[in-house]
């Protein structure tokens, strides 16, 4: 079928696709709204049956992504992510160094595990990491996270599901016994190195620099908070700077109380000792981050005497009213924990720095308290005259560091099981999510909250539109028409074939593009009387290396929201990278696997 012979259903599908791409590029409308709108048009026009339109919502890949959100939630809630940031990413001082270190780690790991769970794992880790770096925007790092995972996935057979799909087609449709684990590395490694170099050198101009609003300017409250260095922890005998306590945004280490001796104007090179009491001043978000640092614990022992388990608690801000019975008393004298079943973690007083231990602070009307307590505290005290302006701090549940090893064991077990193909990625993910909840690394409520509905809706709608391109014949007609113009030179045909596969990858899913182009590549090799292997590796590279649109690859979709990107951001940096990988692949593939 060529373009002139396409039925009206195919033409309508093409119009909807390009209209959707235009709206995503030139408007700020939500991606899920635009793509669901396009899917709805195709459904009502009869291009898609209800079953086909909704097929994306039952797709194994979509369910796998949803399950992996919960698995990563378990890693986050146990503080297991802290190890990743501390030992692998470090504290680079420039964007170039941060991108180089981050992408190098991602490329290496993604060669040995599926890139979807890897990106799901790194998104929250990078968001937390950025808070500790000096004026580096998260928008400079999220696209490199996705691109590095994609590039690393092209370095081995198990790096991405697309490679496994193509290998399966190769075995079932030809007499070939199948590819070895690192056959694709001959082209994947040069592309990965070139891609890393390109992103690092070009991101200054091609990636947006969207710094989030400075919390310091939005929230003038400065809390005083005490923490104790836990004996035997990893930060003992480290300097303030080595322990990561030097450049926390919005936080200032005022003094150290060491066995009654006060160390003021603390030097970054000061060595921490067990049971040091550290007194900080900072904004509420920084205090929350401080609570998550492994090796530090709250200076007040009262947190261990509350009725509710720590994993079920959160942090709440509450302003003391003039009718509160503890006004004029110290927190210790007022028996705050006994009276309210809440522990005061920090106190803010009109920007004034309070140089006292938490328990010795005399409360005044108007003081803002940061409390560790049950989430029900706000509802229980809603009509109380003791406090007003109460609010729960988002994502402030204490980390369960003692269960970090359990979470890592579950995650690594999931990766190994999927990599060895003992079970599918979906089965491994479902088992891992269930174990996270069973071992209480993650509560059922937290598991539900980890799921990002917008990402899932975008993926599901994209799969539905991809089905319309296939069912209507539009994809095949576009592919054959472009290939018709390439002539009979095998190298030229391979270049055009790669380009068509890449184009389809950018507008439909990678696996769908690979499955659709495989029979076309097979017929082309027979018509040219050449080896089919160059076309196999062209499909594997082109269907995996889609950088120019957020809908072209699911990891691009996953970083779209967290990075605060627009559709055009991917186009600016992704199109040149598409072309770069295209050129390298077409040059290298025939040299390794001759026609």
Image: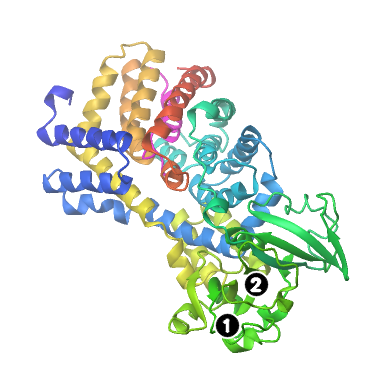
Q: Kindly state the secondary structure of the residue where label 2 is placed.
A: strand
* Residue 308's disc number: 1
In the picture shown, does residue 492 fall above or below 397? above
Question: Can residue 112 be seen in this snapshot?
Answer: yes
Question: Can residue 546 be seen in this snapshot?
Answer: no
- Figure colour scheme: rainbow
The C terminus, quarter of image: top left
In the picture shown, does residue 577 fall above or below 226? above
Q: Nearer the viewer, residue 496 or 39?
A: 39
- Residue 194 position within the rendered picture, expressed as x and y whole percent measured from the top left: 57, 25
- Residue 148 position within the rendered picture, expressed as x and y whole percent measured from the top left: 54, 37
Number of marks drawn: 2
Q: Which residue is at a point 68% across and 60% down the rendered structure image?
A: 281
In the picture shown, does residue 428 fall above or below 497? below
In the picture shown, does residue 354 fall above or below 239? below
Q: Which residue is at a point 63% across and 38% down the rendered structure image?
A: 98
* Residue 345's disc number: 2
What's the CA distance linking mark 2 and mark 1?
Answer: 16 Å
Q: Give the quarter of the image for residue 100.
A: top right
Q: Identify the mark nearer the N-term, 2 or 1.
A: 1
Mark 2 or 1: in front is 2
Residue 534 in the magenta stretch? The answer is yes
Residue 88 in the magenta stretch? The answer is no
* Residue 318's disc number: none
Q: Which residue is at a point 40% across and 30% down the rendered structure image?
A: 571
Left or right, 543 with reference to 323: left
Which residues are drawn in magenta? 530-555
Q: Nearer the viewer, residue 310 or 427?
A: 310
- Residue 14 position within the rendered picture, expressed as x and y whole percent measured from the top left: 20, 33
């Amino acid at each position: 079928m060529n373009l002139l012979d396409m039925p009206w259903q195919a033409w309508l599908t093409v119009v909807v696709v390009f209209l959707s791409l235009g709206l995503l590029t030139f408007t700020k409308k939500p991606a899920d709204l635009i793509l669901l709108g396009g899917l709805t048009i195709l459904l009502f026009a009869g291009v898609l049956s209800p079953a086909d339109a909704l097929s994306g919502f039952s797709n194994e890949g979509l369910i796998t992504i949803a399950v992996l959100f919960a698995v990563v939630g378990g890693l986050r809630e146990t503080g297991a992510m802290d190890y990743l940031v501390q030992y692998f990413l470090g504290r680079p001082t420039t964007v170039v160094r941060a991108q180089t270190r981050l992408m190098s780690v991602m490329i290496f790991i993604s060669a040995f595990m599926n890139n979807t769970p890897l990106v799901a794992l790194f998104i929250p880790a990078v968001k937390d990491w950025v808070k500790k770096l000096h004026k580096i925007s998260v928008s400079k790092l999220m696209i490199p996270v996705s691109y590095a995972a994609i590039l690393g996935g092209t370095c081995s057979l198990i790096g991405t599901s697309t490679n496994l799909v193509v290998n399966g087609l190769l075995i079932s449709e030809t007499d070939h016994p199948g590819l070895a684990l690192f056959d694709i590395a001959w082209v994947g490694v040069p592309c990965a190195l070139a891609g890393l170099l390109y992103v690092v050198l070009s991101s200054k101009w091609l990636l947006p620099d969207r710094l989030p609003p400075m919390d310091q300017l939005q929230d003038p409250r400065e809390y005083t908070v005490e923490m104790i260095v836990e004996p035997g922890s990893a930060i003992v005998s480290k300097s303030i700077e080595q322990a990561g306590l030097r450049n926390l945004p919005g936080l200032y280490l005022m003094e150290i109380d060491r066995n009654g001796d006060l160390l003021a104007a603390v030097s970054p090179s000061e060595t921490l000792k067990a049971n040091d009491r550290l007194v900080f001043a900072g904004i509420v978000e920084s205090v929350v981050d401080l609570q998550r640092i492994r090796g530090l614990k709250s200076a007040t022992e009262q947190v261990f005497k509350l009725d509710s388990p720590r994993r079920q608690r959160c942090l709440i801000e509450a302003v003391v009213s003039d009718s509160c019975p503890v006004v004029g008393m110290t927190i210790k004298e007022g028996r705050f924990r006994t009276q309210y079943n809440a522990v005061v973690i920090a106190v803010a007083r009109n920007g004034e720095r309070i140089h006292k231990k938490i328990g010795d602070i005399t409360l005044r009307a108007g003081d803002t308290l940061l409390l560790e307590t049950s989430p029900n505290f706000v509802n229980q005290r809603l009509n109380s005259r003791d406090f007003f302006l109460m609010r729960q701090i988002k994502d402030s549940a204490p980390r369960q560091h003692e269960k970090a090893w359990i979470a890592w064991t579950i995650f690594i077990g999931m990766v190994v099981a999927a990599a060895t193909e003992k079970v599918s990625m979906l089965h491994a993910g479902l088992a891992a999510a269930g174990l996270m909840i069973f071992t209480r690394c993650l509560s059922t409520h937290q598991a539900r909250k980890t799921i990002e509905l917008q990402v899932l809706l975008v993926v599901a709608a994209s799969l539905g539109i991809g089905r319309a391109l296939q069912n209507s014949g539009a994809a095949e007609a576009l592919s054959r028409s472009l290939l018709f113009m390439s002539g009979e030179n095998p190298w030229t045909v391979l270049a055009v074939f790669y380009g068509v596969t890449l184009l389809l990858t950018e507008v439909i899913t990678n696996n769908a593009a690979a499955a659709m182009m495989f029979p076309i590549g097979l017929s082309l090799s027979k018509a040219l009387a050449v080896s089919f292997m160059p076309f196999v590796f062209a499909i594997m590279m082109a269907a995996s290396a889609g950088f120019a649109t957020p809908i072209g690859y699911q990891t691009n979709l996953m970083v779209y929201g967290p990075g605060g990107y627009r559709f055009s951001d991917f186009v600016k940096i992704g199109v040149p990278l598409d072309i770069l990988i295209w050129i390298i692949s077409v040059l290298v593939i025939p040299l390794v696997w001759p026609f």
